[in-house]
Amino acid sequence: MTRKDPLVDLLIHDLTGPLSIVLTSVNNLLTKEDKCGPYTEYQKNTLKRAQRNAEKAKALLLEIIEVYRSEEGLFRSEQFMIADVVKEALLDALEIVTPDISEELAHAGEDSFKDILARNGIIIDISGKYGQAAFIHDPKKIRQILRNLISNALKYRKATMKLSLSGDPDLVISVEDDGQGIPQEKQTYIFKRFFGASNKKGGAPDGLGFGLSCVKHIVEKMSGDISLRSGEGAGSCFTVRIPPLR
């Protein structure tokens, strides 16, 4: 993809406005039940389903925009705490993949937040320099990378997902799941656009396989690298290394 592609330019321009209107309208209906309701259980579920799917469409649109920005070398140099971006990316991913957990976390304090994650097999470990010090790079890009890797792990896991962040000076992100793993013959293609691994739990249908190709593209534009450790029946672990922006 390049910015010269008129079809993608048209999609970005013409979809941004309508998606924002849909999300705002649905959110208003859900938060103003006292004025618009009361709703039946079926009506509530229908609105929530519309909300989730609009969020998915918005997330995909943002993926395209960020890929374009990285192709053009547009990175914002900011100091930010990794823990803050991790939380934002985790909530983004949960909202799309497991909205029930996301809804529970929305009303949780700091202590209960960790308890809810642990109860649902989600482990977060931030160590090394960036547990205390700020990282310097484009927080939107880091958030997108994290959101994609977390979403992927949540979709394919059996019971647990572990996110580890460490490093000095480079930031090292590791996202591991206990899913069925990726057969060796498919690992060559896992970062290809529109390739699906076909190993999601519960026999769920494949996605478009767009997320991992975006991650690889952005990471490489950030002068970093991404690797995969996996095997059939052995789960998967994606590791990303990103140097700070100087």
Image (tube, grey):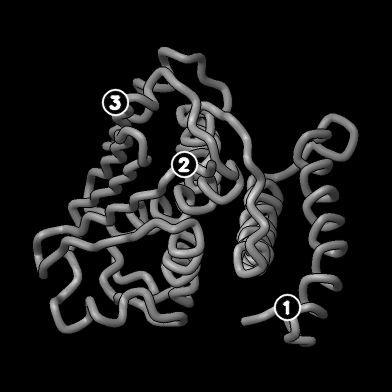
Using residue 126 as the reference point, say whether residue 67 is left or right of it: right
| Residue 91 visible in the current orientation | yes
Are the two marked residues, 1 and 2, in contact with CB atoms closer than 8 angstroms? Answer: no
Q: Residue visible at 9% across and 64% down?
A: 233
The residue most toward the front is 246
Where 173 falls versus 20 (above or below)? above
* Image x and y of residue 70, in percent: 60, 63
* Image x and y of residue 112, in percent: 42, 16
Mark 1 residue crowding within 10 angstroms, few (<14) / some (14–19) / many (20+): some
Q: Nearer the viewer, mark 1 or mark 2?
A: 2
Where 108 falls versus 202 (above or below)? above
Q: Which residue is mark 1?
A: 3
The first of marks 1 and 2 along the sequence is 1
- 75 or 81: nearer the eye? 75
Using residue 124 as the reference point, say whether residue 151 is left or right of it: right
Q: Residue visible at 36% across and 70% down?
A: 204
Are the two marked residues, 3 and 1, in contact with CB atoms closer than 8 angstroms? Answer: no
Q: Which residue is mark 2?
A: 244
* Image x and y of residue 86, in percent: 47, 35
Where 37 falls versus 71 (above or below)? above
Q: Which residue is mark 3?
A: 127
- Kindly identify the amino acid type of the residue bearing the numbered disc 1: Arg
